[in-house]
Amino acid sequence: MAASAAMVGVSAFGPTARPALAASGSPQVARASSPASAMDAPDPDVMLAGSTYYAYTTGTTWGNHIGVLESSSPDSGYHTITGKSYGSTAVGPLPAWEENNTQTSPGVFYYGGHYVMFYDATDTQAGYNCISVAVSATPQGQFEDNSAGPVICQTNLGGSVDPQPFIDPATGQAWVDWKSNDGSASGSAYLWAARLSSDGTSLVSSPAQLLAQNEVSYPWETTVENPDMVVIGGTYYLFFAAGNWQSSNYSEGYAVCSGPSGPCSQPDGSPILTSYGAVAGPGAGNVFTDTSGQTWMSYAAWTSGCTSYSCGGQRQLYVGQLTLGTPAPSGPACSRTLPAGAVVGMASTPSGGGYWMADWAGDVATCGNAGFFGAAGGAPLARPIVGMASTPDGGGYWLVASDGGIFTYGDAGFFGSAGAETLARPIVGMSSMPDGGGYRFCASDGGIFTYGDAGFYGSAA
């Protein structure tokens, strides 16, 4: 787990509000040859305040709970604020609901006239990692957390971790992004966003899903975590880590989003930062700018041959320049290629900025801002898929087979099927209701089958 949230630079929204970058394109991260700090610095979050760079990390021997390093350079020379090998702690006394020594993944920004730190810790009552918030008048801290409970905790999804605050440069509005599933749940991981209050410390909107773990299309995504959103040339980019953080397969990827609340889709099928040389498992990246406007990404990585603490490893802090390569296409590419002649249905996203396509085997391709919520591909189907429809909010879809069997994904509800009936003619297509509360099937003879709140108005049979 890692937070990568600091907003850095100078703008009208505060001394640490991150400005939008100059132009859009395919992000590329320079591979730093040596660490910016030789100490253990897990889940680093770098922020520029004045002329000093601060790196907040999960607690270590040199900084209890949440540690803080500082440097006069963006990519080297980070050291404890005490100048000693201990005592560089960013957070003061902990609230009673948090389990001691479980604090991880800080994300810090300046908003509402103070410095705000989001981080996660184990809730002693819930038993999951949950997100809390602390504030300070200075970037060094100490940050004070007087909360009576977590600000975010999705216990039904395995907890909430890896918080990242973000200021939308288009509106000046603050948001926070995070991951659901602290690793204790068997389900998928999801990245979320919610709008923050005027002081940047509480949620004022319901969570919106940004991205879902998609191990089918992207095998390296055994999880997704550490979200970090930044605007590049008017395009919303979401950087995230994926894989097992205790392995050399941990890596950094990105998605393109339609706005601060998503949805987001992945233009590239491969990560943008993977193990190189003696640097193993780079990830938990966050984007920041230096005093001259140059853009950087900080990340943590092990040394090859030892990717866990059990063998004496350390996750050292690295910083590499973030640049933009070949300009991105006008719309994100489709997530995968379906076999020629096999596509049998499609549906559009509510904004019109993307669509889904399905083939007869139940595989699904996502294009533009369409999110992936699952597929029937690889499952033994009694009959081929013949059509699909999407939910009104774009958070799910249905697939229908020629025998009237129905497959639901995301927030698509099940309202019945014709799979157990004897049909005079096969099903050839389907449509959904505007409220998402039902659907209709159409057979090849014009017969209509209605489910949920879908009404019947006649047939061509």
Image: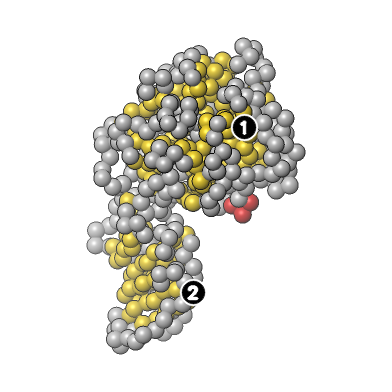
Identity of the residue furthest to the left in this view = 341
Viewed as shown, does residue 331 lie left or right of 198? Answer: left
Query: Residue at image x 57%, y 33%?
Result: 116
Q: Residues within 10 Å of mark 2 (few under 14, many from 20)?
A: some
Closer to the camera in the image, 445 or 56: 56
Residue depth check, mark 1 versus mark 2: number of the one nearer the observer = 1
Kindly indicate the quadrant of the structure image that contains residue 356. bottom left
| Residue type highlighted by circle 2 | Phe
Q: Secondary structure at mark 2?
A: loop
How many numbered circles does the render carry?
A: 2
Closer to the camera in the image, 49 or 150: 49
Viewed as shown, does residue 65 lie left or right of 247? Answer: right
Q: Residues within 10 Å of mark 1 (few under 14, many from 20)?
A: many
Residue 359, visible in the rendered structure = no
Viewed as shown, does residue 296 lie left or right of 445? Answer: right
Up/down of 25 relative to 72, above or below:
below
Query: Residue at image x 40%, y 69%?
Result: 434
Quarter in which the N terminus is drawn: top right
| Mark 1 lies on residue | 135
Image coords of residue 400 (percent x, y): 39, 70
Closer to the camera in the image, 452 or 21: 21
Image coords of residue 260 (percent x, y): 43, 45
Up/down of 121 relative to 80, above or below:
below
C-alpha gap between disc 1 and disc 2: 48 Å
Q: Give me the disc on residue 264.
A: none
Query: Residue at image x 65%, y 25%?
Result: 142
Q: Give me the disc on residue 415.
A: 2
| Residue type highlighted by circle 1 | Val
Up/down of 127 relative to 67, above or below:
below
Quarter in which the C terminus is drawn: bottom left
Residue 331, visible in the rendered structure = yes
